[in-house]
Image (cartoon, grey):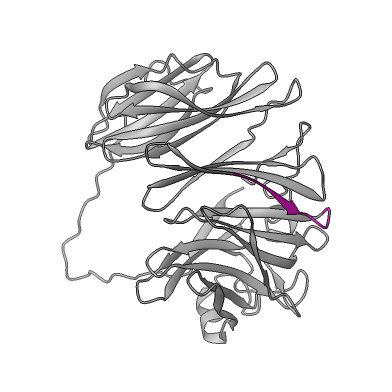
Amino acid sequence: MISGKRLLLALLLLASALPALSQKIVYSEPDKDDTRRLDFEIVGKIHGNFIIYKSIRSKNWITILDNDMKQVAKVEQNYLPDNDRVLNVDFFPYTDHFYMIYQYRKRNIIHCVAAKIDGDGNKIGDLMELDTTQVNFGADNKIYSVVSSEDKNRIMVFKINSRNKKLYMITTMLMDDQLNLLKKSRLAMEMGDRNDYLNEFQLDNDGDLVFTKFDRVNNENIGDAAFVIKYAQADSFVVKELRSDKIYFDEFRVKPDNFNKRIFITSFYFKQRRANTEGFYFYIFDKQSGLAVIEDTITFSEELRREAKGNATIKSAFNDYFIRNIFPRKDGGFVIGSEAYYTTSRGNSWNRWNYLYGSPYSFRSYDYYYYSPY
């Protein structure tokens, strides 16, 4: 199967009168420990070097590459437990260091721990245990999720206990950029239907947590939906219902606008279940007034459909498109980046109805009653 993608917005650069410019591709040589079973993650760039986290079996290390992709250091992280006990690792890079927040299981306790690591791959100071949770034996799934604000001055660790299917318990821990605890809350979230979901958790620069709550109609389109905000120092949720009369939603995307103190929420919308994509739904929440300043839909024009259709028909032009990014502007506007995903095989074609709403997006509770939105 060959997969392809086309961009909704493309810039065509005509340079027939300009000399052709060559492109240089630089890649690193494989290390002797880089086997097929290797797990790795690109942390970011510090002091002009690329920081890569690698793990395999019982070994964990930081590899540092220069701009020419030459390895300049390889530092073992021997304080990490064996990999069969590490459940998840998240990274948050800063100017001269980064945080590695990881969770691991020891007997029936899940530990959430942070390590501060400098640009040379060395641990700074002591490990910081952020939280622990008791679970059933044999539970091997992550239960903590971690989000950071755009300016990186706020980090939040949270977990969701879904043992009671109708009443989730959400624990949040808001921290500053030194991982000092600013506020810990334990809140109840009513979940009225077995098809209710929580998703798109974002943290703004004020430390306010925002996310969406919705249900799926027969595990397909989204029907009833709401936008939820948990203010940094509050011990309650503010829930705003999203308009769902006569339309169905696709996946929601949430983006804080930190400059204008607003929250953007958008989605493709449909007039019927499994119907063609009609256009965009918008909801813009103003934090200062506590009100929605915009809630509306925009229908795609026939001209735009014709430009975007590719091999599809005009009516189905946007059926392969998915919202990837939202870019707020200082003037209060925003730009939406979308991509089309499609297959060219002669077998069963990939589409949002057959596969998208299966396991990658159906996050239900695990055996030990904890739920991860990612």
Coordinates of residue 298 in the picture (x, y in percent): 57, 82
Residue at 30% x, 39% y is: 45
Residue 181 appears left or right of 282: left
Q: Is residue 293 magenta?
A: no
What's drawn in magenta, residue-wise? 185-194
Question: Farthest residue in the bottom direction?
Answer: 302
Q: Nearer the viewer, residue 26 or 287?
A: 287
Residue 117 appears left or right of 103: left
* Quadrant of the image occupied by residue 217: bottom right
Coordinates of residue 233 in the picture (x, y in percent): 52, 52
Coordinates of residue 8 in the picture (x, y in percent): 48, 69
Quadrant into which the C terminus falls: top right
Residue at 69% x, 76% y is: 243
Residue 80 appears left or right of 170: left
Residue at 61% x, 52% y is: 235
Q: Please say whether residue 100 is visible from this viewpoint.
A: yes
Q: Nearer the viewer, residue 179 or 144?
A: 179
Main structural element of the magenta stretch: helix, strand or loop? Answer: strand
Residue at 38% x, 41% y is: 177
Coordinates of residue 33 in the picture (x, y in percent): 42, 16
